[in-house]
Image: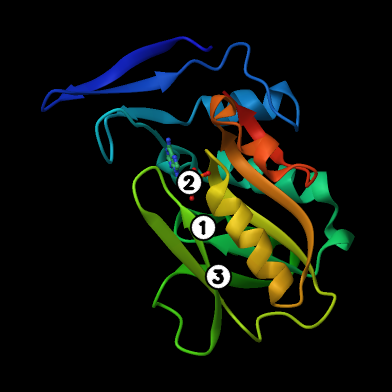
Amino acid sequence: MPDAAVVWQGSGVNVTETHSSGARGDSGPQTARLVASRVLDVPDFPKPGVMFKDLMPLFADGAAFREVIDGIVAYHGRENFDTVVGIEARGFVVAAAIAYATGVGVVPVRKAGKLPRPAYAATYELEYGEATLEVHQDAFTAGHRVLVVDDVLATGGTAEATLDLVERAGGTVAGFTVLLELAFLKGRERLAPRPVHALLTV
Ligand code: AMP
């Protein structure tokens, strides 16, 4: 496990920075170090016991964000996907950047009740209760190769529901990328045999 140092304290909350030495990920140590250097760990958010991985510092650093986006495109190969799906809400940031960089379109997978036209829905278990994600029924033409992106892979429930939605809507999953994977929650195993591309695994 990487070291962490408290970088900000206030209102009884410690925000820590994940140290980047020894960082690992599926695009190599340099990319993993870059992501690790721009993640803040926020304890007990949004509820006690959760260590929230805040990637806003990565999004806010233009040069680092561009390097990460270029790395995702290089990993999958521009010619290997026709559209990119972002999972609400931080996945939208990554998806839109990939879409602009490559010239493909972007499709949002949204939380229940946000899409204006007929949609497919997938409900999955959370630690407490359940959540529903939706995608427009006409989001893809048959056989469309879809790259799916999100910020964090935790238990894999969100990703599993999204990949199922893509297939129900007629798309073919061409790849799945997250900026950060929490390995101890075993999302990668849950999604197997579908491959996971994580820029940083902690
Ligand atoms: P899961 O379905 O458990 O894999 O959770 C993944 C989704 O929840 C992603 O859309 C993440 O944005 C969010 N998420 C879950 N755990 C965290 C965490 N520790 N830090 C930041 N985001 C998280």
Q: Alpha-carbon distance for marks 3 and 2?
A: 18 Å
Question: In this view, which residue lies farthest toward the left?
Answer: 11
Q: Which mark is residue 93?
A: 1
Q: Mark 3: which secondary structure?
A: strand
Determine whether label 3 and label 2 are within 8 Å by CB: no
Q: Mark 2: which secondary structure?
A: helix
Percent across and percent down for residue 114 are 40, 77
Determine whether label 2 and label 1 are within 8 Å by CB: yes
Q: Nearer the viewer, mark 2 or mark 1?
A: 1
Which class describes the residues within 10 Å of circle 3: few (<14), some (14-19), or many (20+)? many
Percent across and percent down for residue 6 are 30, 15
Q: Nearer the viewer, mark 3 or mark 2?
A: 3
Percent across and percent down for residue 74 are 81, 46
Q: Residue at x 28, y 41 (%)?
A: 46
Number of disc labels: 3
Percent across and percent down for residue 185 are 54, 30
Can you say which quadrant of the picture contains the C terminus?
A: top right
Ligand 1: does it lie within 8 Å of the C-beta at label 2? no
Question: In this view, which residue lies farthest toward the bottom?
Answer: 117
Ligand 1: does it lie within 8 Å of the C-beta at label 1? no
| Residue 6 versus residue 147 in the image, above or below | above
Which class describes the residues within 10 Å of circle 2: few (<14), some (14-19), or many (20+)? some
Q: Residue at x 66, y 35 (%)?
A: 199
Determine whether label 1 and label 3 are within 8 Å by CB: no
| Residue 111 versus residue 77 in the image, above or below | below
Report the residue marked by disc 3: 108
Quarter residue 80 falls in? bottom right
Q: Nearer the viewer, mark 1 or mark 3?
A: 3
| Residue 3 versus residue 187 in the image, above or below | above
Quarter residue 173 falls in? bottom right
